[in-house]
Amino acid sequence: MVHRILPAILLTSLTCLITSVGQAASLPPLEIQILSKALAFLDPPLTGQATVAIVYSAGNPASQRDAEALAAEIGNGLSIGGATLTPLVVSAATLAASRFSLVVTALGAASAPVIEAARAQHALCVTADLAAVQAGTCTMAIHSDRRVEIFINRETANQAGLTFATAFRVMVHEL
């Protein structure tokens, strides 16, 4: 009997592990928490109900799965100071037609149309892809592998009309 139960338990555990690893978002929960703290330094801060556009690259199933995982991490309403963030999963191709206060890009979704839509709505664009921030296709990258690091593209922030408190700018890497 134990010989039958043990393999079933191991198989179930392995399946859960593979599923959870396959569904991990590009910005893990710790980095979502860091983002929530960083948003407190926006001047003026977000207030009220705010939509977070979680953008994926159309035609890229991995990007869409990442966007869905990011939305699940944010949940039905992430409270940040005086704002409650609600996720909206949207393709990069249709982002410009959406209304949002913040953009989070899934894998491979940071692009010129995304940053243009973010600029038009004076919204911060956040990604896990440092190269996208360096290229100017997103505004902020967050990494917390060995230590917390936040990178901001000063030019894209200025173009979107985004201002951060001086105390925050001292703590981040401006590119």
Image (cartoon, rainbow, N blue to C red):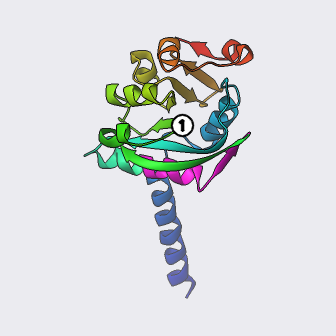
For label 1, the SS is loop
Q: Quadrant of residue 35?
A: top right
Q: How many numbered marks are there? A: 1
Residue 37 vertical placement versus 14 (above, below): above
Q: What residue occupies the far left of the structure in this picture?
A: 59
Residue highlighted by disc 1: 101
From the image, which quarter does the N terminus lie in? bottom right
Measuring 57% from the left and 29% from the top, which residue is drawn there? 143
Is 37 left or right of 150, judged from the image as shown? right
Identify the residue at image location x=33%, y=29%. Answer: 113
> Is residue 34 at least partly visible in the picture?
yes
Determine whether, in the image, residue 50 is placed left or right of residue 97: right
Question: Which amino acid lies under the numbered mark 1 shown in the image of this protein?
Answer: Ser
Position of residue 166 relative to residue 75, above or below, is above
**Does the magenta segment cover residue 75?**
yes
Horizontal and vertical percent position of residue 129 = 45, 28
The answer to which quarter of the image holds residue 132 is top left
Task: State the extent of the magenta-drawn residues as a range.
Answer: 67-81
On the image, the x and y values in percent for residue 96 come to: 36, 36
- The one of 7 and 118 positioned closer to us in this rendering: 118
Asked if 71 appears above or below 81 in the picture, the reply is: below
Q: Residue at x 39, y 17 (%)?
A: 135
Residue 135 is one of the magenta-drawn residues? no
